[in-house]
Image (tube, rainbow, N blue to C red):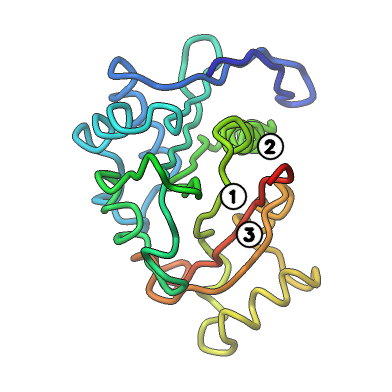
Amino acid sequence: MRKDLYLFVNGKPQKAVIRNYAQADFEALIDVQRVSFPPPFPEELLWNIDQLSEHVKRFPEGALCAEVDGILIGSMTGLLVNMQDYGHSHNWETVTDGGYIRNHNPEGDTLYIVDICVIPEFRQSGIGKWLMQSMYETVVQLGLVRLLGGGRMPGYGPHAQDVTPEVYLEKVLTGEWKDPVLTFLLRCGRMPVGIAREYLEDEQSNNCATIMEWRNPFK
């Protein structure tokens, strides 16, 4: 995949590219993650070279990056699975093979999102939504049933002693509360289909995630 588009940064158009990433991008991709997920996000969950090598070898269609003026500003990674192999209460470690995607199933019917990140300077530019749209296009191109993935709930941590993650999600859906990740995914057209506890080691989310789906409208 390769697409040229314009982002709007501080109200001004700026040309960007979305494309599949390759070995030459690995160090820059790790730097993007480091900037995108500062502490307390666990550093051991950032990409490493071995994981990135598996991504481009096993499912290059699901390895996307965004760049401006030759500098990487974001990335998104997925793999194919059959969700009946994992069940509703799955966790990130199991369904993504710890980010290595060695369990990628070319016959799978679901594009599962391993990760999406955008550096802070470009988070209001629209590039995150364009990366997501590009994955939707991949779902349609490959004739898959859906895109699925767990959305972090970084706003939940401060409320975890008072409400369940289900109540927190409901308050986000009614607009009473906002969550930077869940609100973004909703704006991208993703629909919540459940809560996964102990989904990922993530203090901000109290280890919880909302499982978010996009259905292929042509299936």
- Whole-Å distance between the Cαs marked 1 and 2? 26 Å
Residue 182, disc: 3
Q: Secondary structure at mark 1?
A: strand
Inspect this view and state whether residue 121 appears: no
The crowding category of the residue bearing disc 3, from other C-alpha atoms within 10 Å (few below 14, some 14 to 19, many at least 20), is many
Task: Decide: is 45 above or below 33.
Answer: below
Q: In the rendered structure, which disc, 1 or 2, sits on the residue that comes first in sequence?
A: 2
Q: Residue furthest top?
A: 69
Q: In the rendered structure, which disc, 2 or 3, sits on the residue that comes first in sequence?
A: 2
Q: Amino acid at mark 3?
A: Leu
At horizontal 59% and vertical 60% (from top left) the residue drawn is 212
**Image spot of residue 184 (x, y percent):** 67, 51
Q: Residue furthest bottom?
A: 162
Nearest-to-viewer mark from 2 and 3:
3
Quadrant of the rendered image containing residue 211 = bottom right
Residue 146, disc: 1
Q: Secondary structure at mark 3?
A: helix
132 vs 59, nearest the viewer: 59
Residue 124, disc: 2
Q: Secondary structure at mark 2?
A: loop
Task: Decide: is 183 above or below 53.
Answer: below
Taking the image as shown, residue 6 lies to the left or right of residue 101, namely right
67 vs 112, nearest the viewer: 112
At horizontal 71% and vertical 55% (from top left) the residue drawn is 186
Q: Amino acid at mark 2?
A: Gln
204 vs 104, nearest the viewer: 104
Q: Amino acid at mark 1?
A: Arg
Nearest-to-viewer mark from 1 and 2:
1
At horizontal 71% and vertical 17% (from top left) the residue drawn is 6
